[in-house]
Image (tube, helix red, strand yellow):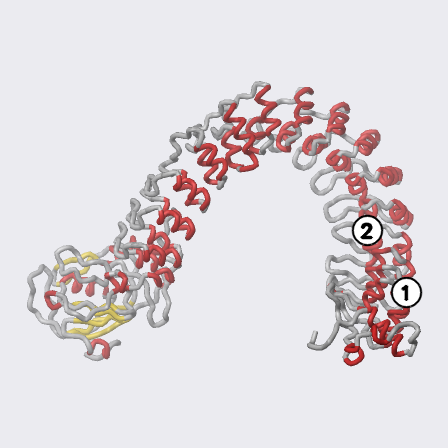
């Protein structure tokens, strides 16, 4: 509201109207705020979101509605949820206000936020006369709201017979709503008069809805006995199955409608009729603990040991859902105490947290340490569930359950509890003398870090567990936390003196794990806490290089060359022996006096052309170099150290990593590598050096273009064969294609 303006209330408007009519005996002029006389906002919503006109229509105040309209109120002004005054009048059955608003131009097809028109509102509330008025004034009888509900569907659902009858005379379309036919909806919602209306109008009582159910299914599921009897009298099929094979008897038994169950059976329903999963009505009754229905079905010959397609019996159903009375009754009737899905009945009761059934089974001789098909005992099952199962856990331990029991995987209950983040169970078990908790070197601390349970990590480290204990692969919990990018756990471990430079059996550090997965924040944190940027794994890769070989090269943004990666230093200082090393992004200067480099140049050349000097690319670049240097543009930049005995200058022709500086992008997939083409000239002499390789001789122009297909072959250089370097790169190329990301 603007400054100086007061919100206009309905009372203010009445006072204002009286005052302006000079009816001083009705109201005192000063009772009307003077500000309203100068700047009334007649359609302003109140704190609840409603306009004065909407509230007047809702309250049935026809005079107030007229006063507001006469002072300029908009009959189509929306209130909260898009509701208009016409919706309000239709909701409360205010027929006279409906008439007046329509005369004042109210739109009968206006929609609220749910796409419902005033006709929907009248149909929901059963005001047949107002329904008629709306339709006679052009309201769309077949308008669907956001859920697909028409005014006819609404009248059927809420059982308004007269509204239904009128709508049926007004060119309504018989549509399904929520997959239900109109007859099914009437039967399901229990409106027997509408059911009879539809059947007298020749509705098919066995017509299926979208789920294959007929009206008899709906009436049985909701317990509408009168409708069930009427439908059966009219010829509905008592054994009709829906799309899942459920009969009306199953629908009634499932929710405990004993009278309907008895009626169906007396009418010939089969108590052992199976659905598509092989279940019979007794399964449904046992699952929901419907004792009276269970007893009657068994009396009528229902099979207490009937297994479904997966071996699930009514007994298993009762155990799973914790219905102790049903469990006892089925056992009294001779039901087999069978396993389901490899679980013993005691295991199932423990896993689902039913302490009363656990106690009942143990008191009747169940073995507390009996294993299921996977070697787990009931304590394993309860441990996976957590806090709500503490009563079961404590009782099992009290009855002698083995807290150190290993299953077929070697996991103990505490391993399961840690994996699922059940801190209370972890505290309980670790306080009960748990001994060897390591599985394949995976300690509870490692498992907690691996599955991102920071509260469990905090508890374990506070108990003094070794944060640097390694698993069988040499990894410590910090590896797992960094691989997952869980900064909270990383900080806990580092603050408890976890070694940030610990290397696993592959030589990989936590920093490399974080870099490979692109966790920039973890990379930065480790760098600030002493992570060594120069540590190499068994492939000779630093964390910088390892990240560049993955789909997360951005992680290397946290590791600048100045922070320690020797392969990324830019320097123009000559090295001993006159060799100069300069590595930039996109250009590389290499020494041509190094014998290993000379060999690699020859081996990588896909063809050699004896062309004139000046016929190649990068002449400007090469002209800037010394006589013993050559500039290679767009050369892959992953450069391991030279062979032992050399000058340790980086060899540019092995373990190549993709880099496209001209494009400003990184592509780790070698099979997408664009051809690298570079030609240049170099004056060579015939003088041999101290090595077994010949020195270059004579003016010659060479050209290298792309990678040849991976293969092992030799080239002759002055009668000295050398291995084609492609074969030396091949294994790494395959590794790069797989992006070298190992699991942590």
Q: Dot 2: what SS?
A: helix
Looking at the picture, tell me which residue is in the foreground, 685 or 365: 365
Residue placed most toward the observer, 649 or 544: 544
Q: Residue shown at 7%/65% (left/top)?
A: 688
**Residue 512 location in percent, x, y?**
33, 53
In the rendered image, the quadrant that contains the N terminus is bottom right
Residue 138 x, y percent position in the rendering: 86, 68
Q: What label sits on residue 172 in the rendered view?
A: none
The single residue placed furthest to the bottom in the displayed view is 38
Q: Badge 2 local density, few (<14 within 10 Å), some, or many (20+)?
A: many
Image check: 514 left or right of 122?
left
Question: Which residue is the site of mark 2?
Answer: 157
Q: Is residue 737 visible?
A: no
**Which residue occupies 69% across, 76% down?**
2
Residue positioned 24% across, 70% down in the render: 632
CB within 8 Å, label 2 to label 1: no
Location of mark 1 (residue): 133
Vertical side of 519 occupied by 436: above or below: above
In the rendered structure, the answer to whether residue 479 lies left or right of residue 377 reads: left
Looking at the image, which is closer to me, 556 or 498? 498
């Amino acid at each position: 509201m603007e400054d100086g303006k007061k919100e206009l209330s309905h009372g203010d408007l009445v006072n204002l109207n009286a005052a302006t009519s000079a009816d001083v005996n009705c109201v005192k002029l000063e009772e009307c705020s003077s500000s309203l006389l100068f700047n009334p906002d007649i359609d302003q919503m109140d704190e609840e979101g409603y306009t004065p006109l909407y509230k007047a229509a809702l309250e049935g105040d026809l005079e107030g509605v007229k006063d507001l309209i006469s002072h300029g109120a908009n009959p189509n002004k929306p209130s909260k949820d898009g509701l208009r005054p016409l919706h309000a009048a239709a909701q409360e059955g205010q027929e006279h206000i409906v008439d007046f608003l329509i005369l004042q131009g109210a739109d009968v097809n206006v929609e609220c936020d749910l796409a419902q028109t005033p006709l929907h509102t009248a149909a929901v509330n059963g005001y047949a006369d107002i329904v008629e008025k709306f339709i006679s004034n052009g309201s769309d009888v077949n308008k669907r709201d956001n859920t697909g509900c028409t005014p006819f569907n609404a009248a059927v659902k809420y059982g308004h017979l007269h509204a239904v009858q009128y709508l049926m005379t007004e060119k309504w379309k018989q549509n399904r709503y929520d997959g239900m036919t109109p007859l099914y909806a009437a039967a399901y919602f229990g409106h027997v008069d509408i059911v009879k209306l539809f059947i007298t109008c020749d509705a098919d009582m066995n017509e299926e809805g979208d789920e294959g159910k007929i009206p008899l299914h709906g009436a049985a599921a909701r317990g509408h006995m009168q409708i069930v009897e009427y439908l059966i009298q009219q010829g509905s099929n008592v054994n009709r199955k829906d799309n899942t094979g459920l009969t009306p008897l199953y629908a009634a038994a499932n929710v405990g409608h004993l009278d309907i169950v008895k009626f169906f059976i007396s009418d010939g329903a089969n108590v052992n009729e199976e659905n598509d999963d092989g279940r019979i009505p007794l399964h449904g009754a046992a699952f929901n603990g419907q004792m009276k229905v269970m007893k009657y079905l068994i009396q009528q010959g229902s099979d207490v040991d009937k297994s479904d397609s997966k071996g699930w019996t009514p007994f298993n159903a009762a155990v799973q859902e914790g219905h102790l009375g049903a469990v006892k009754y089925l056992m009294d009737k001779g039901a087999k105490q069978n396993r389901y899905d490899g679980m013993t009945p005691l295991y199932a009761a423990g896993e689902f947290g039913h302490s009363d059934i656990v106690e009942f089974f143990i008191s009747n001789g169940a073995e507390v340490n009996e294993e299921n098909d996977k070697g787990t005992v009931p304590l394993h099952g309860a441990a996976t569930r957590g806090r709500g199962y503490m009563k079961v856990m404590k009782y099992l331990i009290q009855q002698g359950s083995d807290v150190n029991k290993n299953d077929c995987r070697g996991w103990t209950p505490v391993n399961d509890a840690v994996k699922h983040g059940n801190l209370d169970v972890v505290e309980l078990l670790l306080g009960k003398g748990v001994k060897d908790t390591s599985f394949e070197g995976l300690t509870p601390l490692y498992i907690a870090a691996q599955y991102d349970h920071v509260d469990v990590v905090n508890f374990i480290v506070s108990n003094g567990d070794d944060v640097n204990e390694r698993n069988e692969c040499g990894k410590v919990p910090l590896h797992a936390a960094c691989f997952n990018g869980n900064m909270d756990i990383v900080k806990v471990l580092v603050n408890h003196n976890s070694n940030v430079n610990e290397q696993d059996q592959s030589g990989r550090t936590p920093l490399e794990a974080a870099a490979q997965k692109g966790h920039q924040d973890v990379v930065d944190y480790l760098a600030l806490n002493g992570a060594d940027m120069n540590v190499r794994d068994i492939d000779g890769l630093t964390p910088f290089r390892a990240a560049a070989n993955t789909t997360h090269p951005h992680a290397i943004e946290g590791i600048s060359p100045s922070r320690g990666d020797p392969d990324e230093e830019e320097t123009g200082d000559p090295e001993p022996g006159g060799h100069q090393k300069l590595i930039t992004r996109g250009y590389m200067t290499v020494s041509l006096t190094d014998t290993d480099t000379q060999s690699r140049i020859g081996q990588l050349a896909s063809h050699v052309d004896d062309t004139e000097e000046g016929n190649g690319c990068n002449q400007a670049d090469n002209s800037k170099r010394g006589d013993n240097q050559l500039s290679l543009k767009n050369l892959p930049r992953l450069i391991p150290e030279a062979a032992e005995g050399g000058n340790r200058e980086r060899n540019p022709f092995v373990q190549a990593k993709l880099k496209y500086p001209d494009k400003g992008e990184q592509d780790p997939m070698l099979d997408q590598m664009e051809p690298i083409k570079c030609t240049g000239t170099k004056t060579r002499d015939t003088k041999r050096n101290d090595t077994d390789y010949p020195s270059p001789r004579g003016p010659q122009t060479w050209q290298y273009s792309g990678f040849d297909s991976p293969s092992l072959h030799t080239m002759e250089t002055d009668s000295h064969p050398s291995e084609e370097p492609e074969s030396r790169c091949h294994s790494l190329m395959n590794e790069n294609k797989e992006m070298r990301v190992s699991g942590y």
